Amino acid sequence: MSTVTVVGRAVAKPGRRDELERRLRAVIAPTHAEEESIHYSMHQDLDDPDVFLAIERWPGREALERHLGTPHLTELAGLLDDLLAEPLELRVLGQLHEGDSPKGVL
């Protein structure tokens, strides 16, 4: 099983930034509590505060699919049409071997 990294990008509708941020923050703790979660962090673009990025690592696509089916994620997904200015973008990435070593060690 190969780990996957996910980068999710969400852009708030005008006037909906605070609500989107609140909803995104609400899924952090339950996601950290998921046994298969390796890494989950939420970020806000410093140049465009309406843009949020989630960076996640999972032990494989199957674990990611289980995560996407959790109650906290399905609840969030049901709210996104009201909150997002454009469709949610999810990129699922495989890490290159050389990028998996400690910094400076190839």
Image: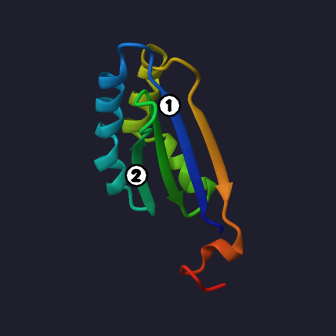
Name the spot of residue 53 as percent of width and height, x first. 48, 41
Q: Residue at x 40, y 46 (%)?
A: 42
Name the spot of residue 33 as percent of width and height, x first. 32, 56
Q: Quadrant of the C terminus?
A: bottom right
- Picture quadrant of residue 94: bottom right
The residue positioned farthest toward the bottom in the image shown: 105
Mark sitting earlier along the chain (1/2)? 1
Q: Secondary structure at mark 1?
A: strand
Is residue 102 something that shows in the picture? yes
Q: Secondary structure at mark 2?
A: strand
- Picture quadrant of residue 98: bottom right
Q: Is residue 17 above or below residue 51?
A: above
Q: CA distance from mark 1 to mark 2?
A: 14 Å
Q: Are marks 1 and 2 in contact (CB under 8 Å)?
A: no
Q: Residue at x 53, y 36 (%)?
A: 9
Please tell me which residue lies in front, 15 or 65.
15
Q: Residue at x 42, y 54 (%)?
A: 40
Q: Which residue is mark 1?
A: 10
The residue positioned farthest toward the front in the image shown: 47
Q: Quadrant of the N terminus?
A: bottom right
Name the spot of residue 87 as percent of width and height, x first. 59, 23
Q: Which residue is mark 2?
A: 41
Q: Is residue 3 left or right of residue 83?
A: right
Q: Is residue 20 above or below residue 42?
A: above
Q: Is residue 3 left or right of residue 35?
A: right
Give the residue type that dot 2 points to: Ser
Q: Residue at x 66, y 65 (%)?
A: 95
Q: Is residue 71 left or right of residue 9?
A: left
Name the spot of residue 90 as percent of width and height, x first. 60, 39
